[in-house]
Image (cartoon, rainbow, N blue to C red):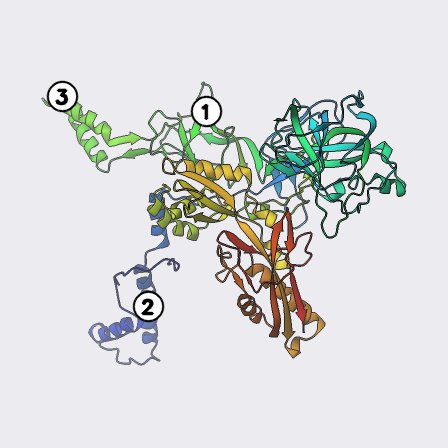
Amino acid sequence: MEFNFLTKLPNSNLDDRAFDDLVEECIQRIPRYCPEWTDHNLSDPGITFIEVFAWLTDQMLLRFNQVPRKNYVAFLELLGIKLQPPAPAQTDLTFYLTTDLPETHRIEAGVEVGTLRTETTEAIVFSTDHPLIIGKPQLRYFLTAQTVEDTPVAFRDRFTNQWTRNPNGQWEGREQSLFEDTPQPGNCFYIVLEPEDPLDGNVLAISITGTTATPTGINPNNPPRLWEAWDGEKWQPVLLQPSDDATRGFSFYEIAQQGSNPTQGTEVVLHLPETFPVQSFTSYRGRWLRCVYTVPESNQSGFGSSPRITGLGVRAIGGTVRASQSTLIQNERLGISDGTPGQTFQILGTPILARRDSEYILVTPPGGLPQTWQEVSDFADSRPEDLHYTIDSLTGIVQFGPLIREPDQLRNKTRIRGKIQQPTLEDTQVQIRDTELQGQEYQYGAVPPRGAEIKIVAYRTGGGRQGNVQKDTLKFLKVAVPYVESVVNHKPAINGADAQSLEQAVLKAPQILRIRDRAITCEDFEVLAKKAGNGAIARVRCLPANAISGAGMVRLILVPQANTDAITQGEGISPNLFTLQPSLRQQVLNYLDERRILGVQVQLQEAEFVGVSVQAEVALEPAYNNPLARQEILMNIRVGLYKYLNPLTGGIDGNGWPFGRPVYTSDIIALLQKIPGVYYLGVVLLFAIRKQDRIWSRQVAPEQVIDPGSLGLICSWVDNRLRSSHVINII
C-alpha cells in the first residue's frame, strides 16, 4: 500500500528476487533434496506447486519492500496530526409569529428545525446558535430628504404638529408626500425607531395608509425604489423579495383601481440585518430605516408625482437568527472511572462539533461534588493536578491524562525495592535513589478517582456537505415553540464540508512541518487560513504587499465552500453562496491573530467574481440529430460549462478556476469538442456578467477574452435577471 500522490525518494530494494528468480532457484535445489525427481517440465504437478509458492513469496517480498500505511499513520500521530471532523453548514432561520405580541418575545437557542423526511432520506436538522429576541418596535421620527447620503445631514420632520400617535402605536394625520412634489432620483424618506427596542434580526411590517387621488406614473410590478437599514457601517438592503411590498412601490392609485382600499393600509415586510444598532444623525437618534427613489433603469418608469400617505405604523412579525446543522445531546453518561491513568470513554454521537463554553465534562467523585474539567488539545503542558481531558471530534473518544514511564524504570524499581526489603548500611543512599526514581515517571493531567461518574453536560453532532440544503427547505419544527406560526430559511445553507480523509491528512503533514504553526510567508497565511475554517474555506489566496496596503498588511482572499450538486442538474452556482459570513470571518481572524508576527495586520476579503455567458453554435453528428439525443447533448454541454467555469470545480485540473486567469474562446472550444455527439462548432462568443448596483447583468458587447483582473475568479450562474447564462444553438 502506497500513497501514490507523494513524491518518491530513492530507496533500497531489500530483496530484489522476482517470481522467475524464485522458480529457478527452487528447480536448482531439486537435485540436492529430491534426486529421484527428474521431470522438471511445466506440466509436472510439482512444478505447479513451486510456482504457487514462488508467487506467494513474491507477494510477501513486495509488501516487505514497502512502508505500510499503518507505519505512516503512526508517524502522523507522532506529529500530532488529527483527521479534521466535518464542518456544519450554516444558514439563517426566519421565525414568523402567529400574532402581534404585546411585549418583547424571546426564543431560546437550540431550537431544532429540519427538512422534510421521506421514506429514503432522513431529515437534515439545524439548530439555532443564539437566542432570538423579537422586540416591540415603536415609530419615533418620520423624516424626508432631497438627496441620499451615506451620512445624512439634512432632514425635514414630517411628524411635528402634523401627525398624532394613536394608542395602538399608529401615526395618522394630514397627507404627507414621501418625496418632493416633483420627484427626483435620490429623494428618500427615513423611518426612525425607538432606541430602547431590541430589534436585531427582526422582521418588521411597515403599515402605510395611502391616498388614491393621483397616480404616480410608475410600473407597480417594477418600482424604482430601494429599502435599506443602517447596520452600523453601511446601508444594507432589507426588502427580501418584491412580493413583500404590498404597496407595490406606493402605487395606491393602481391598487384602488383593482378594487382594494389603500386607506385601510397596506404593508411592506422588511428583514432587518443581524446587527441593527442605535445611531445618531444630526439631532435624531434611534434605529434607522429608509426608502430611496433610485434611478430608473431601461425597463422602469420613474415617479411622475410623489406618493402621498396619511398614516404610518410598524410592528414585529418575526425574526431571523443564525443556525447551524447540528443536533444537541445533553447529559450523556460516559461511564465510571477505574482510577487508572490514560483511561478512555466513548461518546455515542459522532462526529462531534467544536465545543462551546456550555459543553464540557463533569466528574463526580464518590460522595463528592461534581467537578468541571477542561478540554485541551493535548497533554503536553498539563500538570498532574490539572483537570484536563481530550476529545477526538471524529471518533468521539474521551481520554484522560496518561502516565509516562521511562523504559528501564521497572527494572530499577525492582532492584531498589529489593534493597529496601534487605536493609544494609546504604539505606540512606537507597532512599535517595528511590526519590530520584520518582522523576522517571510523570503524570500528564489529573486522573479521575476510582468510582467517579463521568458525564458530558452537552455536545452537538452533525456536519457534512449534505447540510448545504437549498433555500425554503427548512420548514419543520422538531418541537412546538410558543407563538411561532412557521419557520423557513430564505437563503441556502453554506460552508458545510465533509470530514478530512487520510489522504488529505498525509498531504497536510509537509505543510505542518514547514510552517510550524506560525504565519510568516504568504504560503503560511494561506495554509493556516484554510485550516482555521475547519473545512468551511475551499480556497485561499494571499496577495503581496503593495503601496496601498503597506508592508505590514496581509490581504487574504477567501472562497467559502458551496454546494455543487446542482451542477449535475444543469444549474449554476449562485454568487451569493460565496459570501463571507461575519462569524466565519471572525473565526479565521482569531486563529491567525495567535500565529501572525507582531505588527502584521490581516485583512480578509471576498473574491471579485466575473460571470461568463457563452453563446455558441454547435453542429451534431448525423446519427445524433434527433430530439432525444439533442436534448441529452444540450444537457451535457450545459453541465460541462457550469463545471468548467466555477471557482470550486472549474479549470483544467478541476480544482477551481485559477485566480486572475482570463477565459479564452479556445478554452470553450476545447471543452465542447470533447462532448460526445458534437460534430463541429460555429461561432463561439463570450459575454461578461458583472455586478452593478447589487444586480448581476450581462454586458451588451461580446468579449472574446474575459479578463477578471488580478483578484477575480470566473464563475457561471443563473440569476433573476439572466434566465440562462449559456445560449447553445444547434445548427
Decide which of tag 2 and tag 3 comes sooner along the chain. Answer: 2
The amino acid sitting under disc 3 is: Thr
Report the mark closest to the observer, 2 or 1: 1
Q: Is residue 647 at least partly visible in the picture?
A: no
Mark 3 = which residue?
Answer: 428
Mark linked to residue 122 = none
The residue under the point 67% across, 37% down is: 148
The residue under the point 62% across, 73% down is: 682
Element type where label 3 sits in the image: helix
Mark 2 packing: few (<14 Cα in 10 Å), some, or many (20+)?
some
The amino acid sitting under disc 2 is: Phe
Mark 1 packing: few (<14 Cα in 10 Å), some, or many (20+)?
some
Q: Is residue 545 above or below residue 145?
A: below
Q: Is residue 354 above or below residue 218?
A: above
Mark 1 = which residue?
Answer: 372
The answer to whether 33 appears left or right of 107 in the picture is: left
437 and 22: which one is in front? Answer: 437
Residue 605 horizontal/vertical position (percent) = 51, 44
Residue 616 horizontal/vertical position (percent) = 63, 68
Q: Dividing the picture into quarters, in which one does residue 212 lie? A: top right
Looking at the rendered image, the quarter that the C terminus falls into is: bottom right
Decide which of tag 2 and tag 1 comes sooner along the chain. Answer: 2
The amino acid sitting under disc 1 is: Thr
The residue under the point 78% across, 29% down is: 312
Q: Are marks 2 and 3 in contact (CB under 8 Å)?
A: no
Mark linked to residue 53 = 2
Q: Is residue 398 above or below residue 720?
A: above
241 and 341: which one is in front? Answer: 241
Residue 57 horizontal/vertical position (percent) = 31, 65
